[in-house]
Amino acid sequence: MLEKLKRLHFWVLCFLMPANLYLIFFYAPVERTMGVVQKVFYVHVACAWIGMLAFVVVFAASIRYLLKGDEVSSRLALASAEIGTVFISCVLLTGPLWAKPVWNTWWTWDPRLTTTVVMWFMYLAYIILQSGGRSENRRRYAAVYGIVAFINVPLVFFSARWWRSIHPVVITAVEFGLSGPMKTTLFCTLATFSLIYCYFLVLRYRSLTLAEQINQLKGAGQ
Amino acid sequence: MTEYGRKIWLLYLKDLRTELSTQDNLLSTFVFGIMLVVIFSFAFQLADVPVDRALAAVLWISVFFTSTLSLQRSFAIEQKNDALSALLLAVGDRGAVFLAKMLSNLTSLLLLELILVPLAWVLINVQSAGPTQFGLLIGVLFLGSWGLAAVGTLINGMTVQLANARLLFPILLFPLLIPILIGGVLCVSAALNYSTGSVKGWLYLLLCFDLIYTVVPFVLFDLILEG
């Protein structure tokens, strides 16, 4: 049953990803002032969304691990952190591509940029902490770090925001600064990326489980 | 409560005493800090950056880097002869161990700053500062060091128990310190008359950071020193 669901998930993704590219490049109109470079926005926002989502999953799984001490949550947290790092890296790569022609600078210390880069460092630290061996101590410390790092995200964001801000606020509480087709495209991209995240998460979780089993078998053989 | 406070106080005194008795460590930490401040100010001068404006940055970067030396020792000294186990048996409460270690780390950071600040002041040739500026400077250094000591104690409690994790300490520590960096640098700049705007909010933010990172590790420390 699960195997079937996974295969279905795979084929749905095979269809959705090219369809999404079509939406981005042909359906959504070319932005009037920024031109074609604005297309990166859809991928950029979707990657940022997955990065945040992955971090929330790390946080939740860490709490669960500390409460229950089950391997499942620990492995889930690690898998999510790894995927989150990949997507945050994409955010940090696509952002400057857009910023150079539009803001005339590759990088600036805007709150969102600052928070993203700090998150990236915390993700990396988390992965390095976890990757030094799968001892119980490490898992527990990683869980503590996952929680502490998550608490740090709003602190970084608000302190950077107090300092200054030039990042375009596209989605505010009052209105949505995008035209109809653009909005549709953005939401479709968000949905597709969320599905990709789920697929990767399952895949990575399984490979971590298998790696652990192999290690146990090796230990038993010696 | 008084019993609890006494425990923390005794542990704190013990830490200070061991720190002072191993003078080599303290001395090399201070020398490293002084060297950093000198090197940074010299490099800024060479690059023709207005050094007086860089004071806040020089100061905080030096304190951050030097703290990796002093904070790392906090639990490392408990490793010899498995003193950590004895400590836990004697005290019982892990939260008390955390608070005492945090306080002793805070003390050594403040001692370090007592040397670094005048040095940076002289090197950078600060022109004017009144009593309110001094008050702000002391307040911000205290709040920043408190946060640094709290986060550092938590991270050190973890890394000291892992094999080959010495390099991990700064990697885990620095990303968590960014709010202190932002608030600290801005407030020190303000104290030296170089920036405008209200600093009160920043002091509250630093206080908020300190309280969060004192309470959360205090609660979670049972999980750190489980073994």
Image (cartoon, grey):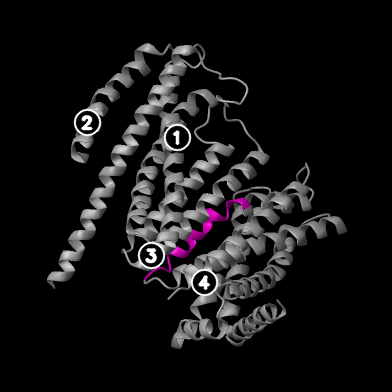
Write down the chain letter for disc 2: A
The circle drawn on residue B138 is none
Between residues A48 and B67, which one lies in front from this camera angle? A48
Residue at 57% from the left image edge and 82% from the top image edge: B91
Residue at the image point whose x is 46% and y is 40% from the top: A52
Residue labelled with disc 2 = A8
- Span highlighted in magenta in the image: B164-179
Q: Chain of mark 4?
A: B
Q: Secondary structure at mark 4?
A: helix
In the rendered structure, which disc, 1 or 3, sits on the residue that comes first in sequence?
1
Q: Establish whether labels 2 and 4 are both on one chain.
A: no
Q: Chain of mark 1?
A: A
Q: Residue at label 1?
A: A49
Mark 1, mark 4: which one is toward the viewer?
1
Callout 2: SS: helix
Secondary structure under badge 3?
A: helix
**Rounded to the nearest whole Å, what is the CA distance between mark 4 and mark 3?**
18 Å
Amino acid type at mark 4 = Gln
Secondary structure found at label 1: helix
Prevailing secondary structure of the magenta residues: helix
Residue B32: percent from the left, percent from the top? 57, 70
